[in-house]
Image (cartoon, rainbow, N blue to C red):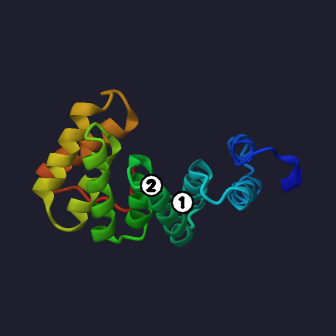
């Protein structure tokens, strides 16, 4: 379909989401960009483009697109969370922490941000703060979820001085 065949940025975004679900990444990225050409301030397409780029491992472009989303909606926790994830993937701990703290300011019940903060604290040598974050995650998360089991392993490993995590990203 050409850009002129769509009635709105929302319609294009909806089509892009469906295409993305079918793993047609380049097609979805093109449609998100088409939606933004049609309506440059259409927040869902902006954020979705940033998330898609992140999932493809294109962290620098994800940072650019998520930053635009944060600029459009500075009150949106998900925009800050995904920008934080992109910073985390680049191991830009300070920037990631700022975004994650903004998420908590906007939505104190956001679960995954505690998991991510634990990783940052551990990577920065603050084991006690990491354990505190993972324990908070465990309080909020469904106990049988795979990430809850991982958080429990991290807590137990940190206490035993045997935990090391790489670039795990909370999604």
Name the residue beneath numbered marker 2.
82
* Any part of residue 162 in sight: yes
Between the residue at mark 1 and the residue at mark 2, the CA separation in whole angstroms equals: 8 Å
Q: Which mark is residue 54?
A: 1
Q: In the picture, residue 80 is in which quadrant? A: bottom left
Residue count near mark 2 (Cα–Cα under 10 Å), binned few <14, some 14–19, many ≥20: many
Whether the residues at callouts 1 and 2 have beta carbons within 8 Å, the answer is: yes
Q: Is residue 86 left or right of residue 161?
A: right
* Residue at the (30%, 42%) spot, across then down: 107
Q: Position of residue 143 (x, y in %)?
A: 30, 27
Secondary structure under tag 1 reads helix
Residue count near mark 1 (Cα–Cα under 10 Å), binned few <14, some 14–19, many ≥20: many
* Residue at the (27%, 59%) spot, across then down: 164
Q: Position of residue 131 (x, y in %)?
A: 16, 49
Q: Position of residue 62 (x, y in %)?
A: 53, 65
* Residue at the (20%, 47%) spot, across then down: 133
Q: Is residue 42 left or right of residue 4?
A: left
* Any part of residue 169 in sight: no
Q: Which mark is first along the chain, 2 or 1?
A: 1
Q: In the picture, residue 111 is in which quadrant? A: top left
Q: In the picture, residue 141 is in which quadrant? A: top left
């Amino acid at each position: 379909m050409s850009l002129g065949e769509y009635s709105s940025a929302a319609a294009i975004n909806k089509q892009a989401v469906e295409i993305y679900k079918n793993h047609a990444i380049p097609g979805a990225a093109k449609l998100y960009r088409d939606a933004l050409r049609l309506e440059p301030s259409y927040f869902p397409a902006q954020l979705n483009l940033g998330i898609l780029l992140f999932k493809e491992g294109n962290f620098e472009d994800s940072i650019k697109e998520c930053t635009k989303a944060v600029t459009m909606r500075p009150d949106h926790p998900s925009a800050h969370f995904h920008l934080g994830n992109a910073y985390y993937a680049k191991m830009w701990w300070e920037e990631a922490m700022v975004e994650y703290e903004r998420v908590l300011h906007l939505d104190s019940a956001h679960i995954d941000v505690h998991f991510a903060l634990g990783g940052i604290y551990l990577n920065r040598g603050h084991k006690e703060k990491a354990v505190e974050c993972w324990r908070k995650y465990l309080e909020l998360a469904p106990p049988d979820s795979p990430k809850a089991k991982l958080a429990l392993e991290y807590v137990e490993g940190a206490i035993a001085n045997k935990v090391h995590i790489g670039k795990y990203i909370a999604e």
